[in-house]
């Protein structure tokens, strides 16, 4: 495992210089929009991941959401369970998905649509549901804007004929985007202690455990995110690690920065760009010093959206890698598999798909 020196996440150097291990991108575009677009494409192609600074999301929106989330996680187990089980949305504890994965966390997964947030807020904050939904909606609006900006810049940097085609997928009124809030207590016992009913009896009996690596405990196991783009912000507690996509199997620690956003390419963006941008594997190592609170906006298209390589990314030398599919089809495959599964492998193009491209 590589531990990143603090200098490694400096503002990314101009194109001719090496990319920092964790590329940091100044979203205020001090070197101009064209340079910002090139930097984003390079970061997403070589790392699948970058740290966004000067991102324009108001600190107030982040603070308000964190306060609402912390108030929820501080509630008694029984009250939190009223917002679960995660089927797949809602409150969950230790169990991740329905295929046997476990982590050292409790979480809330919400649909980002304001009507869905309002419904869930009735159980999450029964005393004052609008307090919770206002905090979530304000935050979601701000991170969606950031995600759209990133996608528009990627569209420009990739030379798409319609550079806004990527952002339109996630800004559609029926987009299937999610907001996930993860709370990792300092000790796994906090999720399982005597009298703590926050995890189901079935989970306690199942003996499921998440294997540690070199004496560490995995908080959230390795995986790629299935959607288009993930926009993550966490408190000042380390734990997030990314796997460098060079095939050498090196996990890199991402130093915490509560003022920044960590943005990663999801499976759909890898498919849309025919593998030019890479969906990066990442995981969280549990901390023993301080609870970690992280919030991730998963920007997704509508369920019926067709996901196919953009024409600008397909050429004779770079044939179509994945067969076209809908987000609904991909989601079905995703929920049928474990967290660490390489889901894009299920959608590899056959020889016939590639041959079709040559005739088009
Ligand atoms: C084990 C699983 C949890 C997950 C659905 C899945 O079957 C495989 C993908 C998982 C993941 C990873 C990124 C996000 O945290 C998430 C919400 C998503 O969209 O895909 C989770 C799913 C989940 O926890 O429901
Ligand atoms: O909690 C974190 O910091 C990251 C979790 C994650 O990768 C996810 O929820 O998909
Ligand atoms: Fe993730």
Image (tube, rainbow, N blue to C red):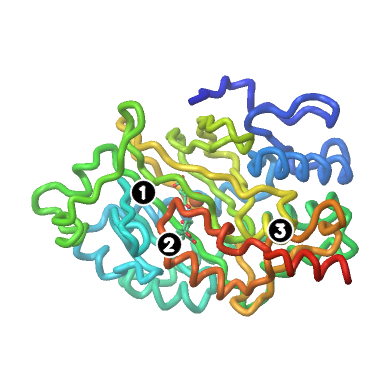
User: For this view, does 26 lie left or right of residue 233?
Assistant: right
Mark 2 sits on what residue?
A: 337
Give the Cα separation between the discs numbered 2 and 3: 21 Å
Residue on which the image places disc 3: 321
Mark 1, ligand 2, within 8 Å: the answer is: no
Q: Of circles 2 and 3, which is in front?
A: 3
**Numbered disc 3: secondary structure:** loop
Q: Position of residue 244 (x, y in %)?
A: 59, 35
* SS class, disc 1: strand
One can see residue 142 in this view: no
Who is closer to the viewer here, 236 or 324?
324
Residue drawn at x 30%, y 57% as measured from the top left = 100
In the image, what residue occupies the spot 19% across and 61% down? Answer: 200
Locate residue 97: give its quadrant: bottom left
- Mark earlier in primary sequence (2, 1): 1
- Give yes or no for contact between labels 2 and 3 (Cβ–Cβ under 8 Å): no
Q: Residue furthest left?
A: 194
Mark 1 lies on residue: 183
Which of the two discs, 2 and 1, sits closer to the camera? 2
- Residue at (18%, 56%) from the top-left corner? 206
The CA span between labels 1 and 3 is 37 Å
User: Residue, x 51% and y 23% (percent of image)?
Assistant: 3
The answer to whether 358 appears left or right of 299 in the picture is right
* Mark sitting earlier along the chain (1/3): 1
User: How far, Cα to Cα, is label 2 from label 1?
Assistant: 24 Å
* CB of mark 2 near ligand 1 (< 8 Å): yes
């Amino acid at each position: 495992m590589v531990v990143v020196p603090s200098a490694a996440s400096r503002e990314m150097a101009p194109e001719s210089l090496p990319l920092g291990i964790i590329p940091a991108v100044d979203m205020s575009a001090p070197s101009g929009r064209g340079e910002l677009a090139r930097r984003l494409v390079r970061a997403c192609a070589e790392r699948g991941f970058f740290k966004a600074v000067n991102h324009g999301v108001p600190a107030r929106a982040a603070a308000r959401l964190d306060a609402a989330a912390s108030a929820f996680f501080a509630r008694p187990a029984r009250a939190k369970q009223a917002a679960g089980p995660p089927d797949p949305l809602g409150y969950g504890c230790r169990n991740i998905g329905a295929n046997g994965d476990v982590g050292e966390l409790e979480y809330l997964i919400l649909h980002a649509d304001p009507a869905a947030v309002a419904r869930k807020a009735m159980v999450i904050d029964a005393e004052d549901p609008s307090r919770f939904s206002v905090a979530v909606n304000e935050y979601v609006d701000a991170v969606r804007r950031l995600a759209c900006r990133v996608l528009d810049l990627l569209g420009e940097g990739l030379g798409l004929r319609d550079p806004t085609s990527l952002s339109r997928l996630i800004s559609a009124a029926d987009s299937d985007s999610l907001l996930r809030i993860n709370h990792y207590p300092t000790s796994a016992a906090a999720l399982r202690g005597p009298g703590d009913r926050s995890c189901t009896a079935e989970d306690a009996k199942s003996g499921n455990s998440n294997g540690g690596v070199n004496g560490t405990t995995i908080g959230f196991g390795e995986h790629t995110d299935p959607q288009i783009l993930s926009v993550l912000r966490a408190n000042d507690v380390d734990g997030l690690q990314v796997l460098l996509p060079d095939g050498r199997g090196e996990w890199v620690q991402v130093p915490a920065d509560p003022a920044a956003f960590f943005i990663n390419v999801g499976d759909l963006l890898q498919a849309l760009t025919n593998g030019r941008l890479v969906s990066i594997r990442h995981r969280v190592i549990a901390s023993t010093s301080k609870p970690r609170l992280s919030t991730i906006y998963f920007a997704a298209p509508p369920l019926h959206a067709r996901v196919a390589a953009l024409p600008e990314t397909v050429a004779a030398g770079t044939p179509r890698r994945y067969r076209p599919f809908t987000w609904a089809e991909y989601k079905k495959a995703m929920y049928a598999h474990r967290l660490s599964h390489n889901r894009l492998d299920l959608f590899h193009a056959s020889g016939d798909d590639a041959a079709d491209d040559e005739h088009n």
